Every structure is written in C-alpha cells, then in structure tokens.
Image (cartoon, rainbow, N blue to C red):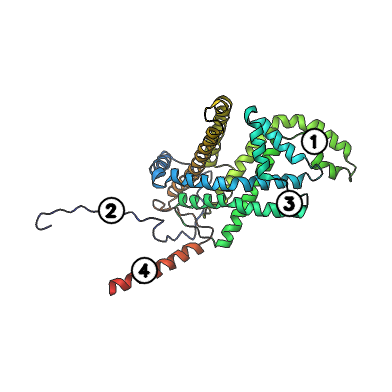
Amino acid sequence: MADGTTYRAELVMPYGTGDVVVTPHDYESPLGRGNRLTKAGWKSVLRRIFADFSNDGMVDRAAAMTYYTLLSVAPMLLAAYSIFSLLLPRMEDAPDSLLADLIQTYVPAELQEDALRLLMTIVGTPSQSTIALVVSVVISLLSASGYVRSFSRNANLMYGRVEGRPIVVTWATMWLVTLVLVIGAVVIILGALLTDGIVTAVLGPVARPLQLEDELEYLTSIFLPVWDYLRGPVIAVVAVALVSVLYHFTPNVRPGRFRVLTLGSALALAVASMLWVGFGWYLRLVGVRSTYGAFGTVLAVLVLVWTMNVVLLMGVKIDAEVLRAKELQAGFDSRRCIQAPPRSNDGAAWRLQLRRWTDRAADEILDG
C-alpha cells in the first residue's frame, strides 16, 4: 500500500466439491497393467492419504457409519436368518442349530448363553410360510441398506464428487448391494459351519426325485474332507469379492472394469482380519474376566466396529488416490479432481441448477 500498511489475506476453503468439472469425453481407464505406479505416483498417493485423513474427517465419518452399523445389525441378522430358513425349509431347527454352532465356535464359553439369547431375541420365531419369510427378507434388507447408503455418501467424498444418480436408482442400487452382502455373509457362515447334515438338507430334496442319493452320499464322503482344506481360502475369496462389490458399485464413479481385488480392498481386509483376531484374543483373555463384564464387551465391540469402518474408508481412499495418480501418469489433469466419469450426472446437474437459483437471490441483494 502507498502508506506502507500491509494486510494479511484470509483464505477460505469452500465446503464440498467446488465448481462443476467436465470429465473428458474420450476417457479411458488408466488402471491397466501397463500403467504401473512410478515412484512419484506412490509419493503422491501417500501424501494425499496423509493430508486428507483429517480434511476428510475420517474419524467422524467412521463414527457416523458405526451408528448406521448398529441400526443395520438387527435387520441384517433377521434377513440372514430368513434366508437360512428359505434354504433349509425341510429342517425346521437347522437355522437355530447354525446360530448355536456359530456361537459355540467363535464366542467364549462364558458369553455363549447371553449371545445366543440376544440373537434369538433379534430373529424371533419367524413364520414357516414362505411368503412371510420373503416379505421379512425384503423389509429387513431395506432397513439394513442404510449402512450401504452411508458408505456410498462417504465413498463419494473420497473420490471428491457428489451423488449423481437419481434417488430411485441410488436406493435400488444400494438395496441390491445390501442383498449381495447378506447373501455373501450367508455363504461365509454356511462355509464356516458346513456339515453333513447341511449338505443333505440342501441337496437332498433335489437328489431324491432324480434318484441321485448314491451320488449325494459320495459327494458328502469325498467333498467334506476336502472342504476342510478349502474352507479358509474360499471364505477369503468371498470376503474379498464382497468388499470389492462395495467399493465398485457404491461410489458415483466408473473407474473401469470390475476388479475382484484392489489395493485398497486387499489392505482393508488384511487389517480387518487382524482386528478380528485381536478382538477374539481380547474376548478370550480379557473380556470374560473384565470387571465391567458385559458392558466392557459392548464397548469393545463398538470400538471394533468404529475401527473397521475407518479401515474400510481408508481402503476407498487408497483406491481413489491410486486412480488419481494413474490418471496423472496417463496425462489427465487430476490434481484437483479425479477425471473418471460418473455413473450418472443428474445429481451434479441438479446441484448446478440449485446453485444458480440461490445465486440469483444473491445477485438481487447486490443489485438492490
């Protein structure tokens, strides 16, 4: 200034994704094998993950997702129990036996009775009517999809964009993703607890009309011993696929073809597995002897769920930053915005119209 006075500039960073960005019409996914991350690419990924951890509010967002997790637990358990009942209609006690086996396998003896009572209170005694079970599955999945919708909103933040799909399409997509997740969870539980009785109950009604009882007996005598060795790898593959479905279809971004394994999903599953092992160790050695008893176990479960949600969000962030770095290596200007096209741009167009509508009111104030 002429009088020698200096002024400090105050910087304001606007909330949200900023102005509308037009993605390239000739966009080709840079995630091919020929575009491996360079040293500079890895540096960019690590720096952005570190810098955005607090900017994106990972801790607070994971806490909000924990809330939705708690709201979705009971509907998802009821949906899984109803699916068990649909799969095993000829064995009325089979779903209850599966719950008892699951608790006996993974819950310390001191907590098994309370855990079984809690689960049976949640699932109740559903009707044996197939129509009632189907209605129960549909309603439960609609309730449980709240977590998936919350995950979708946070995944969009990781990619730096808004939800562009119409609300009907968004809800239908999240419901289908929830259905896939619940079915995958059922497969994992059945795989973990697969017994001769379960195989006979599922395949027996099909084998008897076709006179394949001998083949069924041969299958159980040969398959089940082999399954003891395949159980762990198969469950791991299913878990990877489920997380990849969650990562690929919930954000409003089309990064390329569906990949069963991504860097973010692999790291998230590895850390989540270690967290589960640590939680099991806590229950066996500390939880059952804790002065706080069941209250301490509930607090430990809440911390576990919150930590796992942080890990899942970090996995999405890793995949987003890997995509950004590979776009930069492919020549796209992705420093401020990832250039991958959205699944739909209706949401962004609506936000642009809303901004223009509010700006007109601001212009009237300035012009007045």
**Callout 3 environment at 10 Å: few (<14), some (14 to 19), or many (20+)?**
many
Distance CA(mark 4)–CA(mark 3): 51 Å
Pick the front one: 224 or 298? 298
In which quarter of the view is residue 293 placed?
A: top right
Mark 2 nearby-residue class (10 Å; few <14, some 14–19, many ≥20) = few
Q: Nearer the N terminus, badge 2 or badge 3?
A: 2
- Secondary structure of the residue carrying tag 2 is loop
Label 4 environment density (alpha carbons within 10 Å; few <14, some 14–19, many ≥20): few
Residue 359's label in the rendered image is 4
Q: Is mark 4 on a helix, strand or loop?
A: helix
Q: Is residue 183 visible?
A: no
Q: Distance between the residues labelled 1 and 2?
A: 67 Å
Residue in the image at 41% along x and 40% along y: 46
Which marked residue is nearer to the observer: mark 2 or mark 3? 3
Label 1, label 3: how far apart the Cα atoms are: 22 Å
Question: Residues under labels 1 and 4: Cα distance?
Answer: 67 Å
Q: Mark 2 touching mark 3, by CB under 8 A?
A: no
> In this figure, which residue is indicated by the disc labeled 3?
133
Q: Where is residue 16 in the image (x, y as percent from the top left)?
A: 40, 56
Element type at mark 3:
helix
Looking at the rendered structure, the kind of residue marked 1 is Gly
- Please name the residue that numbered disc 2 is placed on: 11
Which residue does the numbered mark 1 point to in the structure image?
197
Q: Which of marks 4 and 3 is in front?
A: 3
Q: Give the secondary structure at mark 1.
A: helix
Q: Identify which amino acid the numbered label 3 is placed on.
A: Leu
Q: Between disc 1 and disc 2, whose residue precedes?
A: 2
* Between discs 4 and 2, the one toward the N terminus: 2
Q: Report x, y in % for residue 164.
A: 51, 60
